[in-house]
Image: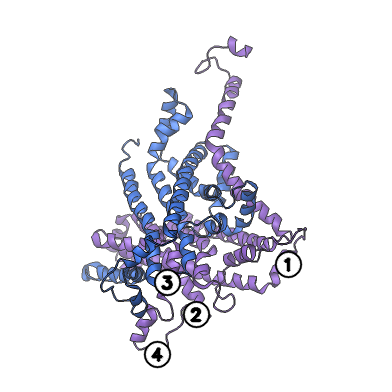
Chain colours: A blue, B purple
Amino acid sequence: MTGSRAPWLRPLVALLAGAFFALPLYIALINVFKPSGQVAANAMSPPAPPTLDNLVRVLTGPDSLFWSSLRTSVVVTSLSIVILTLLSALLGHYLARHTRWWSRAIMVLLLCGLMIPPQVILIPVTQVLKSLGLMSTLQGLILFNVGYYVPFGVFVFSGFMKGVPRELEEAAAIDGATRWQTFWRIVFPLLRPATASVLIFLGVWIWNDFLNPLIIYGPREGTTIMTGVYKSLGRYAADFGGMFALMFLATLPILVFYLLLQKQFVKGLTGGATKG
Amino acid sequence: MAVGVTRPKPGRAPSGTRGSRARRARRPGARHFLLFAAPGTLVYVCLVLVPIVMSVGYSLTDQALLRPTTSFVGLRNYRLLLQDETFLQSLKVTTILTLIVVVVPNVLGVAIAVLLDRRGWLYNALRGVFFTPMVISSVVISVIWTRVLADDGPVNQALRALGVQDPPGWLSDPDIALYSLSSIVCWQLLGFCVVVYLAGLQGVPQELAEAAAIDGAGPVRRFWSVTWPLLAPALTINTVVLLISAFKIFDHVKVITNGGPGTGTTASVAFVVLQEGFVDNRTGYASAEAVVMLVVIAALSVLTLRILGRREVQL
């Protein structure tokens, strides 16, 4: 076995691969803390001395682009993922417990939705949203997010439902609980790991989304944070430090969200003592 | 309801016949559907399924946002597509992009998952490194790489320091740009593959590898004969996800190259559809391109699932 002959080989190779892979991240990160003049000249060297000027410049920009697009992104992402979690948990539960032909048909249609590229539907979607009076509004963007990502939510929840014993629901029904009560008091708490993974994935995707907000929310009303980054490219063309600071600040909230929920996710997996 | 009064209390009455039970179940069944299944289904139908049908409809017209009238033109858009240099070029670009993006992260993903499939803080930290790009927006990743691969960027600075006189223009040379772009996408999607393969490795029983070792199989043989066949489900998931991701690549093209350098050397189908639809405003024609795109991705996904799925069953 190679492992016993050269025990240092695996960690060494792993470390080298990781370091090579992380190089772009390192370059991005040091540029956040470099004085703007140094960035172009010697891209690999660490900032000497590190400065917070870039971050301050972005945070105190005169048009408060960062703050307003941050607010927009927080609203869009949080509302989208809360609605998506509720609707897809309900739908996933329903489809997992009903096997009539039409609920199977709904399931198949939803699974097809997992592979549809947004580009295929965006042109008609703008027409649908226009006819609803929701084009270029946050409500319209949220509604599209819900429709486009509901297949993923249903996929995760209905898959997870297989691990939730049907007897629990039957017992609750015998005790006189309505289906609504049974779902929210008995089933939904058991779906916590699924909820966490749906929140993580959809939160990251929607926060980082660039194309859909660009087309649906449009240029007039403002931007989400990632379309904001794209639109600032021209302005920061000569200011790499500012550019990297803006990207760092735009990524930080979702990174924190991911790390926080990931803990929940693991807790949910290990804390499921009620499963029988 | 007069009938209801004469009946015994509904519920678990032993006298309930088949018919009355069915009648009672129908109304709550409908309410159950409306409450649980209808909202999600309705939004999905209105924002995804109806638009697909509309796309097919648009593709049969000469609709354009700036043209006052729209008329039915049958399959003309599809005939035009066959001679459209831009579109044919975009199919070629997407094919190359997809091939690279399906193969490279799969191969590297297995290698890195096997490498990191150990306990300890070092491996935990390294997993974190490989997963990080998954949480970062394509826009941000594109800007970072645009900087890294710029003509005077860190990579070329390093190459010059090593004595390379004339380092390549990674993103400015029309012959290389598409491969640079593909590599960037591979870098971003690698973490996902590693996650899936690591999860797959958890399901490989330790005893099997030990048994093979006792039988005298070396590490390479053990991997090919024991581990790799058992990773078949992970390969299926990764291949399908990479295929779909590769096919809708737009953000990277838009931010990094905007289709260039030269004419359309990196313009993917997804990029061309949106360019045609939202920049040139020829929505009818763009819809025909979108429909072709949908048919190809659907066919490829089904084919992949069939071929790789069969491999899983054979185990």
Identify the chain of the residue marked 3, using the numbered disc in the image: B
- Distance of label 2 from label 3 (alpha carbons): 13 Å
Callout 2 and callout 4 share a chain = yes
Within 10 Å of the Cα at label 1, are there few (<14), some (14-19), or many (20+) other Cα atoms?
few
Q: Which amino acid does label 4 sit on?
A: Gln
Identify the chain of the residue marked 2, using the numbered disc in the image: B
Q: Which residue is drawn at 35% across and 47% down?
A: A265
Q: Residue at x 51, y 15 (%)?
A: B13
Label for residue B165?
4
The residue singled out by tag 2 in the image is B172
Helix or strand or loop: what does disc 1 sit on?
A: helix
Within 10 Å of the Cα at label 3, are there few (<14), some (14-19), or many (20+) other Cα atoms?
many
Please name whichever residue, B306 or B269, is drawn nearer the observer in this view of the structure: B269
- Distance of label 1 from label 2 (alpha carbons): 34 Å
Callout 4 and callout 1 share a chain = yes
Give whichever of discs 2 and 3 has the lower sequence position: 3
User: Which numbered disc, 3 or 1, marks the residue closer to the eye?
Assistant: 3
Please name whichever residue, A132 or A27, is drawn nearer the observer in this view of the structure: A132
- Distance of label 4 from label 1 (alpha carbons): 49 Å
Callout 3 and callout 1 share a chain = yes
In the displayed structure, would residue B263 be above or below residue B117?
below
Q: Which amino acid does label 1 sit on?
A: Arg
Identify the chain of the residue marked 4, using the numbered disc in the image: B
The residue singled out by tag 3 in the image is B145
The residue singled out by tag 1 in the image is B79
